[in-house]
């Protein structure tokens, strides 16, 4: 389902751009993503740092402005430290964790030189899917969760030719925690 939606969106954006003569950018990515830590009263949960890959398809909405659809995947390990569970008093592997980010956003480019700085923002969802759960710690397993997310990015594109460039960028991606008060 996710792959079909991505492919349909990509084909739609590419078709519109070709019909209107607008630029389309396709940017495959690979890099390093820092994990995160969630503290609670008895310990913490931690997603370890890991490699990541993704793809961004951008459509030129106006000169130096791109509308973009981005997919990023991070496969990592979820670790736990908990004072109340003997199995997890020291930091222990809880499960493998797959995080998928589906984002829609915009980017603003500056200048027409061989080095083009940019910054942008994104909104979307992130899907956290645990696998291979340690059933000694979580006997009922763990469920996948989906969170509203937002992000920021910035960097430079170094143009190697008129059509090909190298993109050097940093992303800050934030899933939005939901809290319930009764």
Image (cartoon, rainbow, N blue to C red):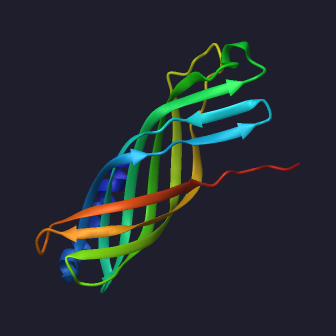
Query: Which residue is situated farthest in the left direction here?
Result: 161
Q: Quadrant of residue 109?
A: bottom left
Specify whether 139 is left or right of 144: right
Q: Nearer the viewer, residue 98 or 21?
A: 98
Query: Which residue is situated farthest in the right direction here?
Result: 182
Q: Position of residue 53 (x, y in %)?
A: 34, 46
Relative to 38, say whether 14 is above or below: below
Q: Where is residue 95 in the image (x, y as percent from the top left)?
A: 54, 25
Q: Which residue is drawn at the image coordinates 42% and 72% (left, top)?
A: 119
How many labels, in total?
0
Q: Quadrant of residue 38?
A: top right
Residue 14 visible here? no
Q: Position of residue 68 (x, y in %)?
A: 37, 68
Residue 142 visible here? yes
Q: Position of residue 129 (x, y in %)?
A: 51, 36
Q: Nearer the viewer, residue 126 or 91?
A: 91
Relative to 169, say whether 113 is above or below: below
Q: Which residue is drawn at the image coordinates 56% and 37% (left, top)?
A: 144
Q: Which residue is drawn at the image coordinates 44% and 46% (left, top)?
A: 33
Specify whether 33 is left or right of 165: right
């Amino acid at each position: 389902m996710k792959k079909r939606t991505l492919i349909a969106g990509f084909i739609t954006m590419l078709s519109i751009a070709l019909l209107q003569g607008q630029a389309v950018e396709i940017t495959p990515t690979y890099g390093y993503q820092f994990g995160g830590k969630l503290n609670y009263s008895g310990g913490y949960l931690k997603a370890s740092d890991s490699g990541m890959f993704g793809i961004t398809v951008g459509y030129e909405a106006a000169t130096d402005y791109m509308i973009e659809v981005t997919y990023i995947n991070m496969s990592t390990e979820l670790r736990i430290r908990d004072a109340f569970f003997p199995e997890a008093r020291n930091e222990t592997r809880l499960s493998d964790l797959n995080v998928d980010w589906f984002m829609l956003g915009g980017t603003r480019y500056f200048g027409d030189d061989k080095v083009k700085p940019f910054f942008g923002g994104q909104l979307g969802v992130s899907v956290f899917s645990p696998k291979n759960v340690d059933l000694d710690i979580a006997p009922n397993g763990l469920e996948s969760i989906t969170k509203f997310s937002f992000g920021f990015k910035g960097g430079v594109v170094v143009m190697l030719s008129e059509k090909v460039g190298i993109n050097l960028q940093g992303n800050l991606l934030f899933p939005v925690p939901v809290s319930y008060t009764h």
